Image (cartoon, rainbow, N blue to C red):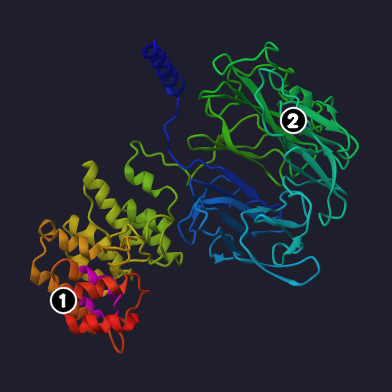
Amino acid sequence: MRFLLGLLALGIYWTAHASMPTWRGVEIRQMVQSAAQPDWVYAMGNGLVFRSDDHGKTWSPLRMPQPAEYTELHLDPKDARHMLVLARSTDAKETPKLQESFDGGLHWTQRAPLKFSEANGSIGGDFFPTQLVIPAGRQTGDWWAYDGRWFRSPDGGQTWLRQPGGRPVLGVVRGNSFSYSLDDNVLQRSGDGGKSWEKVHEFESQIKPGQRARTLSNLIALSDSELVVRNAEGNWLQSSDHGSSWAPASNGFQSLDQQQPASAGPESAAQWRGETWCSAQQSPAVADMLLARCIWDNGSWPSSTCFHVSTDAGRSWTPPRIPGSRSDSDCQAPGLRIGWAPTAMLLDATDPQRMLAAWQAGGLYRSDDGGKTWQESDTGLMFRSPRETAIDWAAVGEPPLIQAVLHRNRELLMRTLASGVDINSPGNHLGGVLDADLAAREMQTRLGEPIHPMMWPELRKAGATSFAVVRPRTRLLTRALDLKLNDIPDELIRSGYDWGASATERTDLPQGELFELLRLSEHFGLTPAQVKRWIDMYISAARFPSADQTTLDLLNTGHPELAVKVLKATSRRIPFDRQSTATRTPRRLIAEGLEAAGKKFWAKRILATMQ
């Protein structure tokens, strides 16, 4: 019986996924726009940030300052060039990162920690925000930040004041005179721009047997006093007295209610057959225009999505909806991918007829007629080569310079360099042009594709150094040797390549890239004479990156004379004081290695610096 149930479940899985579209790009999860410069739109997905300068028709990736899992993208409603990107780590030991740009994402500065003042005006100290609340669209007002405490900024995030007491401010929406905040089941109201808040209503859950509880959400201010909210049952409530009292919606939003359960009795997960779940967004350009997306959810993919537009504050919808109706058949407008749901929506800040919808499994669509018809709007987010390759995948999300090298596109490379781009700029995931050049050769070799000539010789003539950013797993030297590109290692070493940057974090025996190369010297064809020549090049370059790790790697692979040679060259008064990078290797391990190799003088000298 279990076997039959397993086959049935597998068959359902295959059926649900049989019509999945091929993944061909970046799945956008957030889009933002400022009415101050509406032709600029920013989007974030897959840890990448993009910008469009033409209302979302074409996209270019922005190079973030360091690899991170960016989770929130915020835009100053008064300045489209001023943006903040927040990265929250799952590691409690790591502080959240907050990157800020004042030129549309071309240059970034690390903003956190932020300074704050106490309510009485005294200096409070620093904080790292884990959440930001910044008004968007038609909304103007204070910014908010949270790190377990709440802080308010009245000047666009430049100065922060700690907010004593009260509940967190989440989901802020604004009417003409009042601001409203929805936190869990509690509605708060502010009449002074967010400086103070009062609790005006607490919602009680009315979940019936057989219904799935959802979070109270989708608070919309239709006017200064008229509000709507979607309750935990998925139905809509309305208030006409600034949120003090609530009743089932009769203002048109009742048409967006979910499907009611077939019976009042409890239903198991296996009996549950699905429901229509609607959410609504208010146009920042015209307060009375709203877009509702209703998704038929039966617990499997693909789902069905229907868009409904209202131009009269929700009183009527086009196409019309029947209260409690099912959306278990496709009713998507022409141009949209059938059977999939949007992951992010954007209503244009100045044109109520223009909207963007990012789609599951990659893809972005644009409507210029209020959602009646849609067209693809994902140039720069997707690839459409007749036969997608690993290089296509790698190129999505990289800036034009890196894309040109990956695709061996010399025309694009020349255009990019002519525009003033620094040839040594790193990409979003790749460390620079040499990293991209090696990656393209590796993918062609691995997949048995035609091998195109390396671009490195011409890149060097154009001013490229051997590397832009060395990341822990880059290992440029190892990869070049693996590809039999024997001239590149010499260039790397002469230019100061840090072969110790990839050392493991083990404290008992850290091992750098040089250790692996020497340990597998037979595989790489390294002779003792070749190793000595490398060390002479390293010393002649006189940059000495990771000299401590280099010495340890030489000791641990049976090259004590070369280890002492590096130690002497990189020491003035104390060992390794000429090293150009921060020390990362325990001196104790180096001293023990020297002692075991009979180099007692240098072992004692290192031990003396540890006392």
Residue 385 x, y percent position in the rendering: 37, 39
State the SS at label 1: helix
Residue 606 x, y percent position in the rendering: 27, 81
Is residue 409 in view from this perspective?
no
Looking at the rendered structure, the kind of residue marked 2 is: Asn
- Residue 288 included in the magenta stretch of the image: no
Q: Left or right: 333 with respect to 89?
A: right
Residue at image point 88% right, 38% down = 244
Q: Left or right: 163 with respect to 38?
A: right
First in residue order: circle 1 vs circle 2: 2
Residue 12 x, y percent position in the rendering: 44, 17
Q: How far apart are marks 1 and 2 (CA)?
A: 72 Å
Residue at image point 56% right, 60% down = 105
- Label 2 neighbour load within 10 Å: few <14, some 14-19, many 20+: many
- Label 1 neighbour load within 10 Å: few <14, some 14-19, many 20+: some
Which residue position holds label 2?
231
Looking at the rendered structure, the kind of residue marked 1 is: Leu
Front position in the image: 101 or 338:
101
Quadrant in which the C terminus is drawn = bottom left
What range of the chain is rendered magenta? 535-553
Is residue 593 in view from this perspective?
yes
Most extreme residue toward the right, as rendered?
241
Residue 1 x, y percent position in the rendering: 39, 10
